[in-house]
């Protein structure tokens, strides 16, 4: 049975996400879950951030985010600090150990992407990157 184009896109997108997660090392055990890794990644990209903003960026309820932050604090990957302007606000920042974990993970991701990229013929590489840019542009317009 032939799938409609939209069904093909849906299946392909799900399969691509699964494979990219595997490639990025999300299944590699580092004593943290993939959800916790997403939290660390957001903190790494945004610097010290409030638990509320962190939850919004990760797409989790504040209670779920607070629970993850507690586990990451216990694992010495993040620190909680008071907000600079309002001491009632709890900010979260990476520890040195958290930054090291991010460097290791990003190195593995880059190595995985490079290995894939190297499998393309040189004539396919520009087209591949252009297609990804087009996809990014389409997705960006969807959220405007």
Image: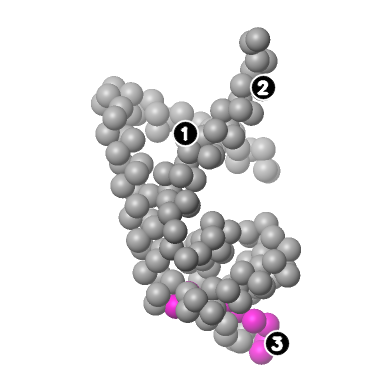
Give the image quarter of residue 61.
Answer: bottom right
Give me the disc on residue 6.
2
N-terminal-most mark, 2 or 3: 2
* Residue found 34% across the figure and 44% down from its top: 112
Question: How far is disc 2 from disc 3 in space, using C-alphas?
Answer: 48 Å
Look at the picture and state if 29 lies above or below 81.
above
Q: Mark 1 falls on what kind of element?
A: helix
Give the crowd class for mark 1: few <14, some 14-19, many >=20 residues within 10 Å.
Answer: few
Tell which of 103 and 33 is nearer to you. Answer: 33
Boundaries of the magenta span:
86-95
Q: From the image, state whether disc 2 or disc 1 is nearer to you.
A: 2
> Contact (CB < 8 A) between labels 3 and 1?
no
Question: How far is disc 3 from disc 1 in space, using C-alphas?
Answer: 43 Å
* Residue found 34% across the figure and 48% down from its top: 110
Residue beneath disc 1: 132
> Does residue 17 appear in this view?
yes
Look at the picture and state if 125 lies above or below 98.
above
Residue beneath disc 3: 88
Q: Mark 2 falls on what kind of element?
A: helix
Most distant residue in the top direction: 1
Give the crowd class for mark 3: few <14, some 14-19, many >=20 residues within 10 Å.
Answer: few
In this rendering, the count of numbered labels is: 3
Question: How far is disc 2 from disc 1 in space, using C-alphas?
Answer: 18 Å
| Residue 139 place in picture, x, y as percent | 60, 37
Q: Quadrant of the N terminus?
A: top right
Tell which of 71 and 52 is nearer to you. Answer: 71
For residue 117, side relative to residue 26 (left or right): left
| Residue 64 place in picture, x, y as percent | 69, 66
Tell which of 29 and 80 is nearer to you. Answer: 29
């Amino acid at each position: 049975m032939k799938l409609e184009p939209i069904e093909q896109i849906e299946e392909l997108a799900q399969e691509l996400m699964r494979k990219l997660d595997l490639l990025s090392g999300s299944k590699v055990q580092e004593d943290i879950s993939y959800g916790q890794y997403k939290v660390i990644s957001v903190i790494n990209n945004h610097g010290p951030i409030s638990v509320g903003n962190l939850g919004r960026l990760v797409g989790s309820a504040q209670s779920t985010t607070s629970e993850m932050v507690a586990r990451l604090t216990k694992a010495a990957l993040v620190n909680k600090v008071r907000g600079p302007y309002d001491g009632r606000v709890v900010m979260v920042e990476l520890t040195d150990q958290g930054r090291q974990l991010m460097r290791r993970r990003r190195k593995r991701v880059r190595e995985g992407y490079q290995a894939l990229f190297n499998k393309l013929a040189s004539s396919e590489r520009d087209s591949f990157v252009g297609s990804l840019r087009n996809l990014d542009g389409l997705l960006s317009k969807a959220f405007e």
